[in-house]
Amino acid sequence: MATSTIAHPIQTLREQVTALEAAITLCLANPKPKPVHLLRTTTRRIEAQLTLLSLLRGLPPHRKPAKKSRRLIRELRRAAGQVRDLDVQIGLIKEKTSASTQKESRQLRKPLKRQRTQTETDLIKLLNNHQTKLTLALESLLKTLTPAERLTLTTTQLTTLTRDWFTRKLPTKPNPDDPDQLHAIRKTAKLARYIAETAPNSARSAHKLAATFESLQQSGGNWHDWLILTNLAHNHLGNSSALAQTFRRHCQTALSTYRTHLSTLSLPPHPNHPPLQPPQRLPRPVIVPPQHHQPSQHQRNPRSHRQQAPRHSSHQQTPPNRLPPPHRSSSLNPIHPH
């Protein structure tokens, strides 16, 4: 095999740490959407690289510095993610605003912009407080891993590790109507994509696998964005809102696309996991009555680690102001990984 298709996990981690330092500097100078998005993506890539290293045998003992680095990276990624999520939501609202929904659009974007300002302030504060600690933690980790600096993986080894890790992360008891599971699959696909992308550009099979995960990640993320916006619009504007109904239609379309990606996903099955079934219906947004108190962290940051799409229990009664159930599809193909 040509050397150009060989992956170098430790060297790649070192390069990503350098990229993170640059992303932090850029974000501190200009915390606008693009720098924030770059910062979040870079933290995800480092998390993916640390996940890959955890799958390898024979590395120098590095659990302690890796654990500390993971914790600091996770805090940074979540803070950047809260800002990024608001940027996405504000952008989608603006994109889907028509002449007849301008008033509703302004009404919905106004509190989101206030939240964006606050989360940006929180992010900058975290960066200033954690930058030195994060740098020291990552330097300690790299120093510990120096004896394995020349470690290499063939394309076959990398893709096998990535496929197996993703399959093992699938739910052991799939619930096709659980939005939390659907969202978790999307996040797992994102990490698997970044693991596969550690291969050189010439490693075609690895990047083909990464493209499969990226497609799944993007379709799942699109569905989740519209689901969150549907909730926000109904909670702030009411059931009869034209903008809320527009978001709901986009949510249904996005879920249909996500179903297609799930049903066509071709990965080797894991012996402990049954085939994952696609959802049978659109998870309905929970319409929460207006609150007169300060919104909680859960409400302020819709796509943060503490808030995901709402769970639904068959034992719960449908609130009077909940949306009617969406149309059930009569023919959905199960996922058959192979």
Image (spheres, helix red, strand yellow):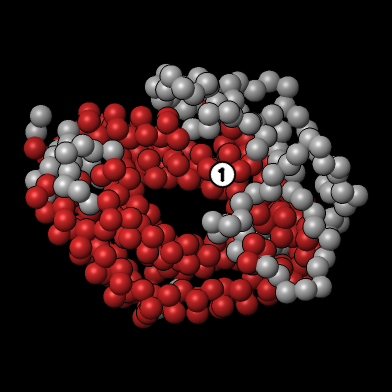
Q: Secondary structure at mark 1?
A: helix
Q: Is 195 positioned to the left or the right of 174 in the image? A: left
Q: Which residue is mark 1?
A: 183
User: What count of labels does the image hold?
Assistant: 1
Q: Is residue 139 visible?
A: yes
Front position in the image: 150 or 321:
150
Look at the picture and state if 84 lies above or below 282: below
Give the residue type at disc 1.
Answer: His
Name the residue rendered at 62%, 59% in the picture. 302
Name the residue rendered at 23%, 38% in the picture. 56
Q: Is 149 positioned to the left or the right of 93 in the image? A: left
Name the residue rendered at 30%, 68% in the picture. 134
- The percent position of residue 248, horizontal first and vertical second, equals 73, 48
Look at the picture and state if 129 lies above or below 138: below
- The percent position of residue 288, horizontal first and vertical second, equals 80, 57
User: Image quadrant for the C terminus?
Assistant: top left
User: Image quadrant for the N terminus?
Assistant: top left
Q: Quadrant of residue 35?
A: bottom left
Please tell me how crowded label 1 is: few (under 14), some (14-19), or many (20+) other residues with Cα within 10 Å. Answer: some
Name the residue rendered at 71%, 54% in the picture. 230
Q: Is 31 positioned to the left or the right of 240 in the image? A: left
Look at the picture and state if 294 lies above or below 303: below
Look at the picture and state if 7 lies above or below 266: below
Q: Quadrant of residue 179?
A: top right
Q: Is residue 88 visible?
A: no
- The percent position of residue 36, horizontal first and vertical second, equals 43, 68
Which residue ends up furthest to the right in the rendered image? 320
Q: Is 112 positioned to the left or the right of 56 in the image? A: right
- The percent position of residue 304, horizontal first and vertical second, equals 55, 59
